[in-house]
Amino acid sequence: MAKKSRPAPIRTPTRRQLSRWRRERRVQRITLIAGCIFLIFILAYTGYGFYAEELRPLNQPVLKVDDSVFKMNYYLKLLKFYSQGQEGAMLPTIAELSLGVMEQGEVLRQEAPKLGFQVTDEEIRQGLNDSKLPDDRAFVDLIAARLLTARLLKDYFDPMVPETCEQAYVQAMLLQDEDTATEVARRVTDGEDFLALAKEFTVEPVTKSKGGDLGWLPRGYLDILLGLDSQVFEDMVFSVAPGKVSEPVFDASATKNIGYWIIEVLEKDETKGSHIRGILLGTKKEALEIRERLERGEDFAALAKEFSQDETSGEQGGDLGWVQRWGDTSTLSRLAFSLEPGSLSQPTPDASKTTKGGYWLIKVVEKDPARKLDGEVRETLKMDAFTNWLNEVRKNHTIERLLTEEQEMWAIKKVLK
């Protein structure tokens, strides 16, 4: 008969074992609690870093117009919108543009109702749908500003621009000095083609870009359409008879893309390069006269301050500092290393500089006392009137640009991502 198995006796732990187990559980609890605290710390640190780097900047103000405050989140949406399809190198310019749009939009939304112009919520919703933009404050404001601009241009500023006005069809050139002007005028009188000579000799940027042919010009708007803010030029245009060429007329306010340097090398150093001073004159004839005065011993600094058309040269008595030999192909660099210390250069032309003063030679092809304004011209004139009005009413508002360089860089980096 098989023996019955007896149950194993239950061993009672000793006091030492119980003490050891309690210590082990206590260590486990401490380790677990420490691990949880560490994990919470890591999560909190990471969360704060995310907040500090990503969330907090979005709530920082970047613009204030009167009582209206615009935050980074608003600005960033417009920056992303205007940056679509643009190269990264354009983003700093677009960043400045976006802030300007915000500022202009708020001024417009406050000022347009004073002229009786408003837009409805339904028009804004339709504009958002047409442009496929979300119903967000930044884009609501953008659409409202666009609609108000279009309405003002059509119904307020359009009536201010005439449909017709006195116009002249003009060909023109600006000659750099009296001798050149006299020679070119003689060649025109002898039958040479005016435009061919204009393309060769004009030193003024607008006439250069148009090859001398300025087309129909309306009286009173030449500064807006051409950027030629010259009463001398306008008076000539509307005083010359159709089919005639003017005599050369000097215009002290005319801007031309050429100047003449007189350079003196003060000292040379193998490491620093050449230390020079210079005077920039508007014509070769004037430069020759100043050079003669320098040769006679007149003070270089005094003449530079009086006559130089280069801002740095004029302010610093001609001192242009040190010029490096390598990597600099400018006129100044070439002169600096072609002269010995103490010697004066001959008058040297520099097409990279802008100077004032020149002789207009103008041919009026045709005139019309009441010619209809071209459509594009009218749009330009309306936009100019709108811009002038906006600049004027802007003075009625307190505007604070709060965007810092660091904030702008942060926003640009977000867009680039």
Image: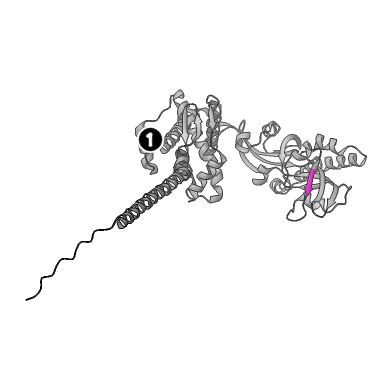
Range of the magenta residues?
320-328
Q: Which residue is mark 1?
A: 124
Observer-nearest residue: 42 or 51? 42
Mark 1 lies on a secondary structure that is: helix
Q: Left or right: 399 with respect to 8? A: right
Up the image or down, 87 lies above or below 104; here it is below
| Residue 327 in magenta stretch | yes
* Residue ranking furthest to the bottom: 1
Observer-nearest residue: 272 or 108? 272
Q: Amino acid at mark 1?
A: Ile
Q: Position of residue 160 (x, y in %)?
A: 52, 27
Q: Position of residue 140 (x, y in %)?
A: 40, 36
Is residue 38 in view from this perspective?
yes
Residue at left 51%, top 40%?
98
Q: Position of residue 193 (x, y in %)?
A: 71, 48
Q: Position of residue 134 (x, y in %)?
A: 37, 41
| Residue 351 in magenta stretch | no
Residue at left 10%, top 70%?
4
Observer-nearest residue: 292 or 46? 46
Q: Left or right: 140 with respect to 408? A: left
